[in-house]
Amino acid sequence: MKRSYAIGIDIGGSSLKCGVVDDGGKLLYSFRFPIDQTYTQGEIIALIIAAVRKCAAQAPGKITGVGIGFPGIIDNNTVIGGADNLPDFIGVELGNIITASTHLNVTVDNDVNMMGIGEQLYGAAVGCTDVVFLTVGTGIGGSLIINGQPYGGYKNRGAEMGHITISHGRKRCACGALGCLEAYASVKALVSRYTELHGVSYSDEFTGQLIVKNYLAAEPQAITAMHEHFDYLSSGIAGFVNIFSPQKVVIGGGISEAGSFYIKEIGNRVRRKTIPVSSKHTCIVAAQLGNQAGLLGCAAKAFMI
């Protein structure tokens, strides 16, 4: 059977990941460009174009299209507003720019939406039509699959899963609002709370990985911090389950790989907080694709153009 090929470009906080994927979801070739320094809009676009050309040269056949996952609000292949590390991207018609330079069909969407598509087609949510996908890291990102299709609200401005309010008038979130799920349940918030419990100023020595290690070793501060993390995150997820009643809630991000205890603990708390009829068919699971989810989702969306 003749294969089709697409290029995935996943732009994150510190790197631009690129790859060639076949229509069966197999990653054939990949590499990354670091972008952890300050880059201008023009430099980022030049890197994307260079990545597309490098991938195209390695593809074993004709490229069907290019999928780009970009951190920020995306509407009709235009970056309405980029992430904090990409502040120059406001109203940038990224899809048209890359198409004009490469002469390939290009689709652009939010990076977490692309991860969700990847997990639905090739990972933890294969065969599901209704999925809530969350990435728990420095912040909390999310995406929705409803009736088999990605859903981002009107003009793709919604599905900001990390920014539902779970506490009134308390911690300020990076988005500027008070009491967001991200401000309480992200890994950054976990580290901040753990540091506070130790009575010291913020230190790079404290990481999510260290806290998990100390939690498993029964350190009191780690147990307190992790239980608060579980409680906050499960409260947010319970709200999503009551609203969407998904078949699966897929949790990604490095901390989701801490061990089976992590997903089990969250799942148990979610079940206690949800309406039974809403959560009856919902499973809480860890993402399966790791750092390949974005690339595979980008390529998958390119096949849909």
Image (cartoon, rainbow, N blue to C red):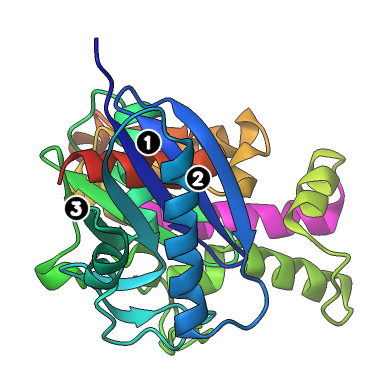
- Residue count near mark 2 (Cα–Cα under 10 Å), binned few <14, some 14–19, many ≥20: many
Marks 2, 3: nearer the viewer = 2
Q: Mark 1 belongs to which amino acid?
A: Glu
Instruction: Determine whether the residue tagged by mark 3 lies in a helix, strand or loop.
Output: helix
Nearer to me, 302 or 150: 302
Q: Mark 2 belongs to which amino acid?
A: Gly
Q: Earlier in the sequence, mark 2 or mark 3?
A: 3
Determine which residue is flagged by label 2. Answer: 252
Q: Are marks 1 and 3 in contact (CB under 8 Å)?
A: no
Q: Quadrant of residue 64?
A: top left
Q: Are marks 1 and 2 in contact (CB under 8 Å)?
A: yes
Q: Quadrant of residue 205?
A: bottom right
Determine which residue is flagged by label 3. Answer: 243
- Residue count near mark 3 (Cα–Cα under 10 Å), binned few <14, some 14–19, many ≥20: few
Q: Earlier in the sequence, mark 1 or mark 3?
A: 1
Q: Position of residue 106 (x, y in %)?
A: 24, 56
Give the Cα distance between marks 1 and 3: 21 Å
Determine which residue is flagged by label 1. Answer: 119
Q: Are marks 2 and 3 in contact (CB under 8 Å)?
A: no
Q: Mark 3 belongs to which amino acid?
A: Ile
The span shown in magenta is 219-237
Give the Cα distance between marks 2 and 3: 21 Å
> Left or right: 10 with respect to 133?
right
Q: Earlier in the sequence, mark 1 or mark 2?
A: 1
Residue drawn at 43 percent across, 47 percent down: 294
Residue 294 in magenta stretch? no
Image quarter (top left, top right, bottom left or bottom right) of the N terminus: top left
Q: Position of residue 182 (x, y in %)?
A: 49, 69
Instruction: Determine whether the residue tagged by mark 1 lies in a helix, strand or loop.
Output: helix
